[in-house]
Amino acid sequence: MRSCVLFLAIAALHAQPPPRTFEVASIKPNQTAGESRRAGTSAGGLFTASNVTLKLLISRAYGVAEAQIEGGPGWIDTDTFDISARANTPLTLSREEVRPCLQALLAQRFHLATHTTTRQGNVFSLTVAKNGPKFQQHSGEGKPSIGVSSDSSTAAVSATKTPMARLAEYLSAQAGRPVIDNTALPGDYDFRVEWSTDPAKNPSAPSIFTALQEQLGLKLEATKGPIHIIVVDRAEQPSEN
């Protein structure tokens, strides 16, 4: 009986609409500097980020690559911050669920104002290579998870239960231009791909283009296409906690 009640309670939590704002949030200038930066969610409605720029936060809030963000004062791409915020839920917010909370936070604390536009430009098309994909569709339970790890010469994307559209979103940030998912692969997948970000330091490691083809059986091809642009009309240094 107790397990049944617990199951119903968990089901009720998942049935509730996700929160659209953070209850509390701390934003502080980052003091560590360095190349490492991180942003993610965890149980209890937590969102934490370290050594992140406002441009990266806008990228996470609106689901676009940093290359798709224009305008605003110069410091949005240089000044870095540490953030700890909590929404009113015991659950872990997905990447999509946390976006309205981030949008509200940026409007309240950075006084961010934006508008959107679309223009034709240089994009990459993500397609399946000749011999097909080299990864497996996810089976069984488990939560969607995807993340980027990097050091001074290499970067890697590791994913569990992840659709190709999400991979394209991550690659947009790494490739420096929007990546459009044209794989036509349905469902969710498990995969890992690693490549060199500095050939001078790691000449034996493949480029991102070679790594995708050799390790995942996917191709990135340069083409033209519509690009969704976020234009920053106003941004101010964050208000005090």
Image (cartoon, rainbow, N blue to C red):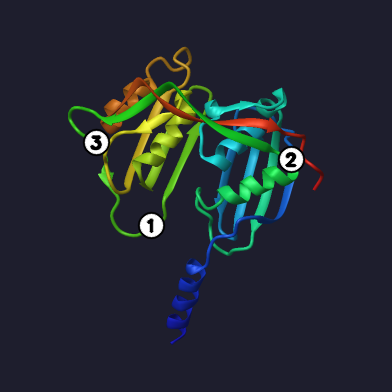
> Residue, x 80% and y 42% (percent of image)?
239
Q: Image quadrant of residue 31?
A: top right
> Residue, x 61% and y 35% (percent of image)?
115
Front residue of 234/239: it is 234
Q: What whole-number distance in Å separates the C-alpha atoms at marks 3 and 1?
A: 21 Å
Left or right: 128 as drawn, with respect to 230? left
Q: What whole-number distance in Å separates the C-alpha atoms at marks 1 and 2?
A: 37 Å
Left or right: 19 as drawn, with respect to 182? right
Residue annotated with mark 1: 142
CB of mark 2 within 8 Å of CB of mark 3? no
What x and y, as percent, mark residue 24? 72, 55
Residue annotated with mark 3: 134
Residue 54 is at least partly visible in this image: yes
Residue annotated with mark 2: 111
Left or right: 102 as drawn, with respect to 187? right
N-terminal of the pair, mark 3 or mark 1, is 3
Mark 1 crowdedness (10 Å alpha carbons): few <14, some 14-19, many ≥20: few
N-terminal of the pair, mark 1 or mark 2, is 2
What x and y, as percent, mark residue 114? 64, 36
Left or right: 77 as drawn, with respect to 130? right
What x and y, as percent, mark residue 73? 72, 25
With respect to residue 33, does 85 lie above or below?
below
What x and y, as percent, mark residue 232? 65, 31
Residue type pointed to by label 3:
Lys
Residue 53 is at least partly visible in this image: no
Front residue of 207/26: it is 26
> Residue, x 53% and y 23% (percent of image)?
152
